[in-house]
Image: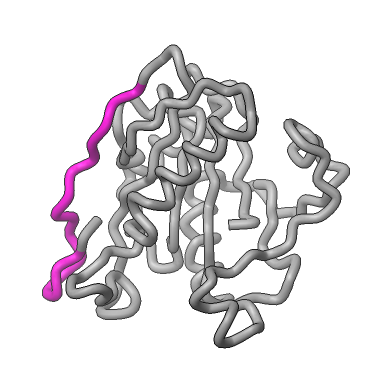
Amino acid sequence: MRALLPALIALPVALIASADGNRSTRSPFGSADLAQLNFARVAYESEGGMGEAYYAFDGRLWARWETDFPEGDQNFNKRVAQLTRIHVNTAVTTRRLDAPDLGDFPILYMVDPGWMVLSDEEIAGLRRYLASGGFLWVDDFWGDAEWQQFAEVMRRVMPGREWRVLTPPHPIFSTVYEMQEMPQIPAEPIAYPQGPTAEPAGMHRYLL
């Protein structure tokens, strides 16, 4: 495992699904460059129907893991390179959790996992990844039901572990910059017309 970051799940925090099911129609792609920081989006299966396993937007169906893909990933890589001295692999990359090269990606990004289901092989792969020092960034949840579903999946990954809230004294908040708070930042289309965010400030920032 080449990952150097702690086994942390940060929650400051979709496979294209067909209308008759939730199987992936896009294979994971992209390769790691071991001379740079590698960041990969997690591709996973979801259960449920429209609005749960998948949703319609911009003329097609999107799986939950695809939200803001690939633009969000491209922007993240760009900003890390811009604001730090880290050499970042800017290739857009996806991986499933049972991928044999998962350890080449110190940071995995998981989006909208509120209806996620993982196979036994994926559970084992994520457990190995975290136990070896991998960093899983998870964002976000639309309500407590989605959070509870994700938490149940993670209990299979790390049985016996308890969730606890992270606060600014934790070293992760001073790894690069000194962070005194971590406000929730909603997307512009939500913030401007609605004002309130989807969740109360301070929810779901946990270490497992």
Q: Relative to residue 64, is residue 102 depicted above or below?
A: above
Q: Is residue 128 left or right of residue 9?
A: left
The residue most toward the bottom is 194
Q: Position of residue 86 (x, y in %)?
A: 58, 23
* Residue at position x 88%, y 43% in the image: 169
Q: Which residues are magenta?
A: 17-32
Q: Position of residue 122 (x, y in %)?
A: 34, 42
Q: Nearer the viewer, residue 51 or 69?
A: 69
Q: Position of residue 130 (x, y in %)?
A: 53, 34
Q: How is this picture coloured?
A: one colour
* Residue at position x 58%, y 57% in the image: 13
Q: Relative to residue 136, is residue 115 depicted above or below?
A: below
* Residue at position x 44%, y 38% in the image: 126
Q: Nearer the viewer, residue 107 or 196?
A: 196
Q: How many marks?
A: 0
Q: Position of residue 134 (x, y in %)?
A: 53, 31
Q: Relative to residue 92, is residue 86 depicted above or below?
A: above
Q: Nearer the viewer, residue 124 or 173?
A: 173
Q: Is residue 165 left or right of residue 6?
A: right
Q: Is residue 85 magenta?
A: no
Which of the 4 image quadrants contains residue 185?
bottom right
The residue most toward the top is 35
* Residue at position x 66%, y 62% in the image: 204
